[in-house]
Image (cartoon, grey):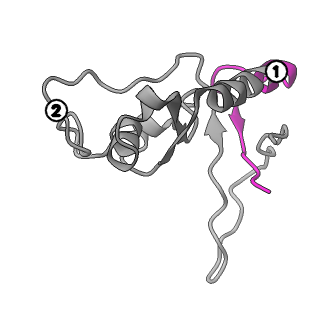
Amino acid sequence: MLTSRRPRSTSGTPSTGPGQPSPPRPERRSRELLRPPRCTGSSTIRGCGIGTATPRAACQAQWPNYSSHGKDCDEYPFSTTKEGAYNANGNFSARALTSRDNQKAGSQLSTWYNDDRILDGDAFYVNVK
């Protein structure tokens, strides 16, 4: 479940002294659906000569022919954020899910963006419970 939790405005950055964790970085909404770079002849998990794996390559490696079994490759960070998995330099998670579940989750995310007025470039946090 997503909740509207935008970063608080502060006069400076929070202190992160010794032993204190760094503050989390927010996701930022992107109106453009981020897609992988176009590849020519690359079928490896490292993909497209960019030196990092792509979500689709990761799903294909773990769940061969997942799309022929009615599944989509779901990724995090969301593809609708500027930090999306295709821009994450290999720092992402991906899993093959049933197409219905993945599309429902995407629809719920879109509804949340609209209902909480998360606009292009707005920062928000994802709270996992």
Magenta-colored stretch includes residue 114: yes
Amino acid carrying mark 1 in the image: Arg
The image position of residue 41, as x and y in percent, is: 13, 27
Q: Quadrant of residue 55?
A: top left
In the image, is 68 to the left or to the right of 83? left
Task: Please tell me which residue lies in front, 55 or 82.
Answer: 55
Residue depicted at 22% across the width and 46% down the height = 51
Q: Which residue is mark 1?
A: 117
Which disc number belongs to residue 69? none
Task: Please tell me which residue lies in front, 63 or 55.
Answer: 63
Q: Main secondary structure of the magenta part?
A: loop
Closer to the chain start, of discs 2 and 1, is 2
Q: Quadrant of residue 60?
A: top left
Which corner quadrant holds the N terminus?
Answer: top right
Secondary structure at numbered mark 2? loop
Q: Which residue is mark 2?
A: 42
Residue depicted at 58% across the width and 23% down the height = 30
Q: Crowding near pointer 1: few (<14 within 10 Å), some, many (20+)? A: few
Task: Please tell me which residue lies in front, 15 or 66.
Answer: 66
Q: Quadrant of residue 18?
A: bottom right
**The residue positioned farthest toward the left in the image shown:** 41
Amino acid carrying mark 2 in the image: Ser
The image position of residue 49, as x and y in percent, is: 17, 37
The image position of residue 50, as x and y in percent, is: 22, 39
Magenta range is 112-129
